């Protein structure tokens, strides 16, 4: 089935892709965009081809790996998207005959079906299950698991998995109409009928109909773009297919391709030549097909670009169009019942121009479970894209296990409400609060994550949003770090204050993980500090001024520079509130110290043990100094009764204010002071 890739490598393939580029401010690298990120890109040369055409996709049902199947003029490139940011061309299925600009492919029952306008090409079948067995070196040259030569060249192929049928069109048989194959044996489809009565069929979407027209429910219907008409064909009996109805419309150029909404109620149709023939912008025609026998054109969507529309596909409430030079356009179907469409995003694969020429995007495939979309460019190759429907922003890149994290979510327009948000991949025990049960419209909400004990490291959870017809996801990325006990370092010396503990993680300016500082207001006081004679434990070892000579200093309560000889403190320098000299006879009066000037206050100012002449009160009993011995002085005397130290009220100088002094005071009471 496989051959080594020597031939492919001889062609000079370079298999490294362009790296992921988000759409920011209207661009993803050089590509204009809106709400669509570029995940990766491979050129046609990297794919092993010389010019691109169709693209389709397949998801391995066993491994979940997604594959892009990219048409080239010389065959089909098979690209593994196991790492979507770094796609790998794992195989190449060469053309069955010669090169051709046109190649189309579809997938059914894990088989790839390929047709081409190349002469004598026929049908190629590739069993995609072999892809999971491929080993490097890549790419391998792939061999078909089946072929059919019932026809030679063909323009297109379509599948209906529900009925096991394969449809080929644009051949040289049945007027170029439908060739209908039974694919019960997927590697060897059998021709069981055809339909050419409506003329050439360019493209078709065959379905087992489940729309609102009760008379056709459960029957097989092909909705066909027949170049000059829209044709609905009953293909229930492949041997006796019949036209149900056909429609035309104004400014018809070339009915190129059409696609049904998932409820089979509406159909969108693209005309490949109306832009060039009629000079109109990109046009999409909207049909109500509730009555299959009388489809009704209910609206026309005109884009803002002049580009030619080519292929379009519907997923739920979304329409993905490949409009040649305007690239991939993403539209909302919310208004389709009213005959309107709304563009909600795009990715322009051809930045040079939006002109109405046959260049740029050929097709796209929007059906991967991951939500990624692959798109083909005739000139530029394969693009892996990621549409955006949500913006998820964590308030911080890092959160502690003991902390909480708020996450803001914006739901963009385009999906059909109601919306049900949920968080996937959340470890057991983690608490999520604030997640709304249902949203009725686009908007912003915030949820909170907490109780992160036991969770650690970089995390990537998934925010899921279920809408009508679509499920979209967006990663929620942040890092959880263990909470560590830290301490305030107010003085910035690298050592913390044991009295100010805080649990935290990550960068915490002003905090350290040790509690060794003994004075967090002085940067020079720290465990590695140098001890100096300053009455401070500079090195935080519990000892003060160790290594320096200690002498006694005397308590100086009144701050007069002389201390109380009875109260001492040993230190290497004068401590605050102490003096180097003792001898203060009243350490509560700053006017009393050895050598003080007489104050005529009636007590010993200079601490010489005597009441010198200059210290005597010239008017005994006038304690208030108002010039007479009065009641005011009596009150001062009574307040001082019992005083034993520097007492002006001690009139008999016996060292204590007592009864004898009271008698002396009363003798002087009422007398004026001498002049």
Image (cartoon, rainbow, N blue to C red):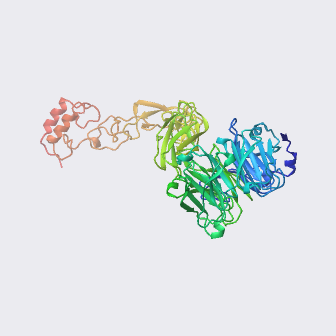
Q: Is residue 131 left or right of residue 632?
A: right
Q: Can residue 489 be seen in this view?
A: no
Where residue 73 appears, as percent x and y from the top left, is: 79, 55
Task: Find the residue positioned furthest to the left.
Answer: 670
At 44% from the left edge and 38% from the top edge, which residue is drawn?
576
In front of the other: 624 or 361 = 361
At 80% from the left edge and 57% from the top edge, which residue is drawn?
100
In front of the other: 388 or 295 = 295
In front of the other: 509 or 644 = 509
Where residue 78 appears, as percent x and y from the top left, is: 76, 46
Q: Is residue 38 left or right of residue 559?
A: right
Counting labels gives 0
Vertical placement of residue 277 versus 327, above or below: below
At 16% from the left edge and 36% from the top edge, which residue is drawn?
665
Q: In this view, does 37 lie to the left or right of 317?
A: right
At 66% from the left edge and 65% from the top edge, which residue is drawn?
273
Q: Is residue 259 visible?
A: yes
**Quarter location, residue 45:** bottom right
In front of the other: 63 or 108 = 108
Where residue 154 appears, as percent x and y from the top left, is: 76, 54
Where residue 539 appears, as percent x and y from the top left, is: 57, 34
Quadrant assignment for the N terminus: top right
Vertical placement of residue 387 versus 464, above or below: below
**Quarter location, residue 342:** bottom right
């Amino acid at each position: 089935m496989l051959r080594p890739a020597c031939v492919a490598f001889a062609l000079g393939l370079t298999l490294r892709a362009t790296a992921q580029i988000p759409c920011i401010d209207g661009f993803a690298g050089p590509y204009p965009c809106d709400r669509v990120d570029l995940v990766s890109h491979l050129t046609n040369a990297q794919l092993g081809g010389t010019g691109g055409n169709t693209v389709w996709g397949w998801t391995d049902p066993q491994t979940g790996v997604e594959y892009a199947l990219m048409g080239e003029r010389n065959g089909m490139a098979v690209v593994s998207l196991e790492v979507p940011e770094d796609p790998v061309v794992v195989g190449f299925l060469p053309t069955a005959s010669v090169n051709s600009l046109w190649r189309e492919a579809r997938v059914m029952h894990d088989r790839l079906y390929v047709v081409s306008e190349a002469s004598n090409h026929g049908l190629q079948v590739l069993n995609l299950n072999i892809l999971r067995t491929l080993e490097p070196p890549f790419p391998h040259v792939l061999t078909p698991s089946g072929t059919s030569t019932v026809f030679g060249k063909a323009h297109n192929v379509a599948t209906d998995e529900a009925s096991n049928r394969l449809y080929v069109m644009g051949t040289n048989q049945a007027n170029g109409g439908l060739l209908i194959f039974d694919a019960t044996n997927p590697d060897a489809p059998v021709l069981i009928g055809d339909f050419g009565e409506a003329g050439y069929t360019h493209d078709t979407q065959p379905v087992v109909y489940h729309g609102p027209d009760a008379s056709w429910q459960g029957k097989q219907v092909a909705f066909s773009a027949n170049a000059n008409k829209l044709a609905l064909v009953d293909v229930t009996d492949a041997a006796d297919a019949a036209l149900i109805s056909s429609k035309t419309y104004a400014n018809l150029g070339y009915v190129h391709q059409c696609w049904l909404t998932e409820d089979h109620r509406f159909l969108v149709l693209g005309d490949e030549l109306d832009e060039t023939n009629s000079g109109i912008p990109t046009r999409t025609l909207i049909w109500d097909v509730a009555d299959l026998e009388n489809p009704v054109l209910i609206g026309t969507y005109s884009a803002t670009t002049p580009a030619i529309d080519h292929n379009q596909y519907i997923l739920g409430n979304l329409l993905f169009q490949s409009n040649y030079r305007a690239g991939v356009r993403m539209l909302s179907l919310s208004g389709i019942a009213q005959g309107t469409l709304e563009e909600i995003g795009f990715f322009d694969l051809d930045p040079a121009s939006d002109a109405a020429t046959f260049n740029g995007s050929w097709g796209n495939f929007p059906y991967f479970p991951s939500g990624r979309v692959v798109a083909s460019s005739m000139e530029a190759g394969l693009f892996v894209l990621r549409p955006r429907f949500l913006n998820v922003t964590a308030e911080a890149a890092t959160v502690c296990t003991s902390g909480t994290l708020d996450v803001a979510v914006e739901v963009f327009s385009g999906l059909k409400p109601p919306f049900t948000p949920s968080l996937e991949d959340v470890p057991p025990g983690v608490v999520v609060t604030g997640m709304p049960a249902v949203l009725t419209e686009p908007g912003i909400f915030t949820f909170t994550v907490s109780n992160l004990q036991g969770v650690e490291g970089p995390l990537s959870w998934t925010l899921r949003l279920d809408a009508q017809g679509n499920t979209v996801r967006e990663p929620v990325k942040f890092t959880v770090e263990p909470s560590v006990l830290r301490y305030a370092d107010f003085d910035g010396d690298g050592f913390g204050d044991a009295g100010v503990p805080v649990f935290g993680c990550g960068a915490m300016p002003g905090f350290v993980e040790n509690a060794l500082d003994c004075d967090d207001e002085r940067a020079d006081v720290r465990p590695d500090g140098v001890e100096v004679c300053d009455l401070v434990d500079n090195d935080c070892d519990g000892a003060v001024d160790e290594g320096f000579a200690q002498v006694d200093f005397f308590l100086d309560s009144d701050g007069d520079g002389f201390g109380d000889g009875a109260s001492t403190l040993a230190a290497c320098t004068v401590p605050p509130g102490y003096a180097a000299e003792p001898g203060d006879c009243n350490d509560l009066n700053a006017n009393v110290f050895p050598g003080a000037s007489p104050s005529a206050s009636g007590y010993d100012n200079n601490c010489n043990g005597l009441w010198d002449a200059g210290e005597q009160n010239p008017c005994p009993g006038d304690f208030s100094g108002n010039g007479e011995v009065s009641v005011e002085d009596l009150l001062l005397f009574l307040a001082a009764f019992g005083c034993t130290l520097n007492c002006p009220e001690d009139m008999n100088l016996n060292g204590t204010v007592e009864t004898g002094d009271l008698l002396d005071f009363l003798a002087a009471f009422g007398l004026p002071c001498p002049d």
